[in-house]
Image (cartoon, helix red, strand yellow):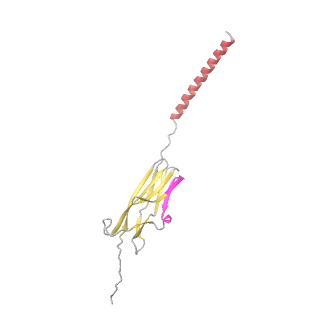
Amino acid sequence: MSAFSKRSRFRAVYWGLLGLIGVVLALGVQGDRAHAALPQASSVSINMSNPSCVQVSQANGVCAIQLPYLVASGSDPSFSRLEVLVNGKLRLYEGGFFESIGYFTYQMLPGGLKVVCGKPNASGNPDYGKIYPVTVNAYMADGASASDSMNVACPAFEARIFLPSIKKK
């Protein structure tokens, strides 16, 4: 046998073994991938105290919806935003970045959210004015969300106009 054929046979065996080792390693890595943990979806929950509606002034029909506290908690630090809607209109917004919680407290809104009180029986109840739905939405960055809603009844306001009595001379 010549030196050239020994070298060729050695190269063939060498490359064959490297190919076999590569296949074994590839199969081993694929097996490890099957055991890798899947990422868990995030979740968010809302805790809201009962809102109340109070008349701001006896002279006009302005009321204020007051929220003692409102907390949205996420399962991981990807909390995105917290929204408060009154009667379907966005009234409060809080955005988060690498947060796991968002909140509003009474101290953050000392005057409350201003609304119209409404005339007596505006909601179908003669003892109250308007009733407003208060909706809270919380969102995580991956799209997970939660929502909570409550109705709050405002006191009735009946405008009274007093005209001066003027006598003709």
Which residue sits at x=56%, y=25%? 23
* View extreme (top): residue: 1
Quadrant housing the N terminus: top right
Report if residue 136 lies within the magenta region. Answer: no
Which residue sits at x=47%, y=52%? 139
The answer to whether residue 3 is above or below residue 161 is above
Magenta segment, prevailing SS (helix, strand or loop): strand
Quadrant housing the C terminus: bottom left
The mark total stands at: 0
Report if residue 106 lies within the magenta region. Answer: yes
Residue 164 x/y as whole percent: 36, 83
Residue 129 x/y as whole percent: 35, 68
Q: Which residues are magenta?
A: 94-109
Residue 45 x/y as whole percent: 45, 53
Quadrant for residue 128, please give it.
bottom left
* View extreme (right): residue: 3
The answer to whether residue 49 is above or below residue 15 is below
User: In the depicted view, which residue is nearer to us: 19 or 59?
Assistant: 59
The answer to whether residue 168 is above or below residue 148 is below
* View extreme (front): residue: 169
Residue 85 is left or right of residue 127, and the answer is right
Which residue sits at x=52%, y=31%? 31
Quadrant for residue 4, please give it.
top right
User: In the depicted view, which residue is nearer to us: 69 or 160?
Assistant: 160
Which residue sits at x=40%, y=73%? 60
Residue 36 x/y as whole percent: 52, 37
